Amino acid sequence: MSDPQHILEHVFGYDSFRGPQQAIIEALVRGDDALVIMPTGGGKSLCYQIPSLAREGCGVVISPLIALMQDQVDALKELGVRAGFLNSSLSSAEASATEQALLSGELDLLYIAPERLVQSRCQSLLQQAKLSLFAIDEAHCVSQWGHDFRSDYLQLSLLHELFPTVPRIALTATADARTQKEIAERLQLTEAEHFLGGFDRPNIQYRIQHKDKPRQQLLQFLRTEHPQHAGIVYCLSRKKVEQTAEWLSKEGFTALPYHAGLPATLKQTHQRRFLREESVIIVATIAFGMGIDKPDVRFVVHLDLPKSVEAYYQETGRAGRDGDAATALLLYGLEDVVKLGQMLGNSDGNDVFKRHERQRLDAMLGLCEITSCRRQVLLRYFGEQSSPCGNCDNCISPAETWDGTDASRKLLSCIYRTGQRYGANHVIEVLRGSSNEKVMQAGHSAISTYGIGKELSNNEWRSVVRQLVAQGLIDVNADAFGALQLNDSCRALLRGEQTLQLRRDKQITASASPAKRVQSNIDEQDMPLWHDLRACRKRLADEHQVPPYVVFHDATLIEMVQKRPTTKQAMLTITGVGDSKLERFGKDFIDVILEHEYRQLEGTSL
């Protein structure tokens, strides 16, 4: 066995562990099992990579991310780790070579897809090899209540049965208490030590706005804050993904579509371009993102309401993995609630599943409509308490409220008098006294609530509707084309026994863009060195056919700018520089720094 601290420093180039990493690693090195809940970017991979190197044998990583295994293995090889993978993308000769390397003890880490692991041939292969541990990545896939359920994961309890002496670690970034319990039960990890690394991502600025010409909202956001940054834009449908990517491309951005309906080769090409090029925007459904290790994603935008707080948390967590400032922008509308309700109604799940999913959707809508700190509510959902964060839209620009009691009663009365059969648009048109054909034909110009709401604009009424839905005072019947309907919760308000404060909609922009905040660590006179180091990194990444961040993260380059190491020994003190990377890349970066030092000396002497 090797010392984990030595591996951390000399292989991965870090001088200290973060959060519960050390305790997790020590547990696995002892041979104990572990269940790890740690946020995206929190360093989960080190929790199984270091024990795999410290223990005798090969670590086996079960991952659903076939499309990313090659990149993960390439990144490990750049660190000097002997890594390989087995999945359907390999030829029989390539697979045989990897299997032989495993059996002969020439692998430190082996990545396997769950559907391959459950095959008897693969199990027989592993039983012939010396194994250090099993790591079950993206473990929330085992839960029927999780947002990325994968049936193959249900059979992974066989690891405990077939390999009782090999320690197991299950890891995920997103699991509420119910999902954590199911993961532990299904994977037979109820006796394992559970490690909760905290869910807070303080570098992400959460901003949620109602949809009001969403394309223009997105365009302003990108042009003013992220004109040259990599990011992800999520849409609910494949059609919207393709239309949005095409539109952004016409607006001058490098935007690529990604969804399950595209050819596999095209998806792989787009994913690789996103990982390896700079300033690429991926427009995607939720089919994209799980396991993406790109550290410098500066923004995640949702153009439609996510299905749950868990999904929202995991998808926004793909921004700012490097710890630098990032933005999560969500644009939503009542039509999203209707659409998601229809999708839920058409699902194959039983009534219990549908009721639970509806509760999760309601919680997501509630997060959108609150007036308090969004991060507090988000963390509370996962069982954590926090103070107001100062880095969400409600903290930066506190919401203005107004007495919406009278307006809410007018809305409820109008829903009742129109028969609880119409959606928000029609009810609002009746309230505002519209004379359009649909209102006239329905005879709604003759009811008592016709025209009693002219004091509010269409958008203001839509805000009232959204907030009453979020507070559970009215329901949206997705089976009846989004018809608004009353429920028992609104009785007190109708009877005058309850008052209601509502939030005024606002648009907010950040006080400083993430681009400026990221580069605030670099003095103006050092910017030429910063750009030259990035250029050096890009050249080396292209030569090695890996993404730039596999060479070095931005944080490592910033530290080089600040400390200016000009010897190999000095370079080893930079965070992220281990023995292998020093050998492969150190001289190139030292040469860049020396060139700048020479120029400065030359300028001083002149």
Image (tube, rainbow, N blue to C red):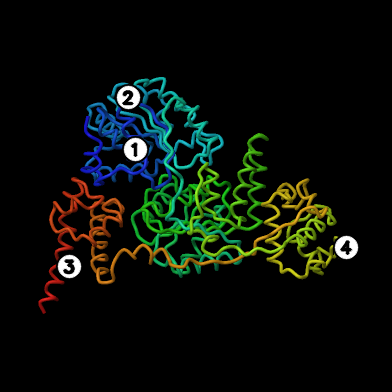
Contact? badges 2 and 4 (CB < 8 Å)? no
User: Disc 1 marks which amino acid?
Assistant: Cys
Query: Pointer 2: residues within 10 angstroms few (<14), some, or many (20+)?
Result: some
Q: Please state which amino acid type lies under the numbered disc 4.
A: Ser
Determine the CA span between mark 3 and mark 4.
78 Å
Tag 2, which secondary structure? helix
Q: Secondary structure at mark 1?
A: helix
Q: Earlier in the sequence, mark 1 or mark 4?
A: 1
CA distance for labels 2 and 1? 25 Å
Q: Position of residue 149 (x, y in %)?
A: 52, 37
- Which corner quadrant holds the N terminus? top left
In three-dimensional space, the C-alpha distance between marks 2 and 4, rounded to whole angstroms, equals 77 Å
Tag 1 and tag 4, C-beta contact below 8 Å: no
Q: Nearer the viewer, residue 463 or 128?
A: 463
Task: Give the camera-side residue of 203 and 434.
Answer: 203
Residue where numbered disc 4 is placed: 448
The residue singled out by tag 3 in the image is 596
State the image coordinates of residue 516 (x, y, percent, origin top left): 38, 67
- Residue 431 rendering spot, x and y as whole percentages: 79, 64
Q: Residue furthest left?
A: 605
The amino acid sitting under disc 2 is: Leu
Q: CA distance from mark 1 to mark 4?
A: 66 Å
Regarding residue 86, the answer to whether it shows in the image is no
- Which residue is denoted by mark 1 in the rendering? 47
Q: Is residue 365 above or below residue 450?
A: above
- Give the class, few, some or many, for how many residues have Cα within 10 Å of label 1's Cα (few <14, many ≥20): many
The residue wearing badge 2 is 125
Query: Gap between marks 1 and 3, in whole Å?
Result: 38 Å
Between circles 2 and 1, the one closer to the viewer is 1
Q: Are marks 3 and 2 in contact (CB under 8 Å)?
A: no
